[in-house]
Amino acid sequence: MPQPRVLEEVVAGRFDLGIADHSPSHPRLEGERVGQDELCLLLPPDSAAPQSFAALDALGFIAHPDGFAHADELLGANFPEAHPGADRLRQRSFVNQIGQIPEPVLRGIGYTILPRSGVDAHPGRSRLQVMPLPVSVRHELWLIQRRNRSLPARTRRIRAEIAEVLAALRRGQRGPAPSAFRRPSGCGKPKMRKEKLSPSAGSGA
């Protein structure tokens, strides 16, 4: 789910918890920094590592909702003279379904850029080739919720489990997914199953 949508859903109260890559600025939100997630450039399994930006661009970009922002960050940092901007990349496909983003890469159609959490969560991760780059780009991970909202005990327990998994990403470990939420099989951050608050919990700010 794109970042603006995550924030909108938490502000509206449709999600109790969300994960963002920055500290929330909305006055009705609060957040806790819980980890980092590295951006990865994914190549087709049998593709040789491109020796230039032109060779990479010739493979074709597999775009997705967060892909253009990821491309400007990662390609801009590693190919500052050659990267023309994500809007000018040679695009081969656009995938809107989170769990399907790596599939065109696995089929050799092109390359894409995903957070490490998305790579590790994909069932075909052993076949995904991550291109080594001289400059790494990492996103902060913030666990966000509505300010002053009192969460039920079950949701607080889920929150603690999520924080543990995200902290493992920062340490470079692959932690188990908490039972109360599912990790996406593609790009983006873990998706929490919405917990409904009991009437006694209050409606939050």
Image (cartoon, grey):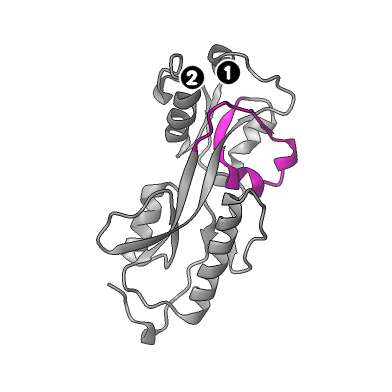
Measure the C-alpha gap from mark 2 to mark 1: 11 Å
Q: Is residue 91 toward the left or the right of residue 10 in the image? A: right
Which numbered marker is on residue 79? 2
Q: Is residue 175 toward the left or the right of residue 145 in the image? A: right
Name the residue located 58 percent from the left edge and 18 percent from the top edge: 56
Q: Is residue 200 toward the left or the right of residue 174 in the image? A: left
In this view, the residue farthest toward the bottom is: 200
Which x, y percent locates residue 30? 34, 63
| Magenta stretch encompasses residue 151 | no
- As shown in the figure, which amino acid type bears the numbered disc 1? Leu
Occupied quadrant, residue 27? bottom left
Which residue is labeled 1 in the image?
A: 56
**Can the viewer see residue 99?**
no
Which x, y percent locates residue 121? 64, 49
Name the residue located 46 percent from the left edge and 48 percent from the top edge: 140
Q: With respect to residue 197, does 171 lie above or below?
A: above
- As shown in the figure, which amino acid type bears the numbered disc 2? Phe
Q: Are marks 2 and 1 in contact (CB under 8 Å)?
A: yes
Disc 1 element? helix
Give the position of the C terminus as an image quadrant.
bottom left
**Can the viewer see residue 180?**
yes
Disc 2 element? loop
Which numbered marker is on residue 102? none
Name the residue located 58 percent from the left edge and 38 percent from the top edge: 101
| Magenta stretch encompasses residue 129 | yes
Q: With respect to residue 21, does 144 lie above or below?
A: below
Name the residue located 35 percent from the left edge and 74 percent from the top edge: 149
Which x, y percent locates residue 37? 53, 46
Q: With respect to residue 42, does 167 lie above or below?
A: below
Q: Mark 1: give few (<14), some (14-19) or many (20+) Cα within 10 Å.
A: some
Q: Give the mark count.
A: 2
Instruction: Tell me the magenta residue range.
Output: 110-137
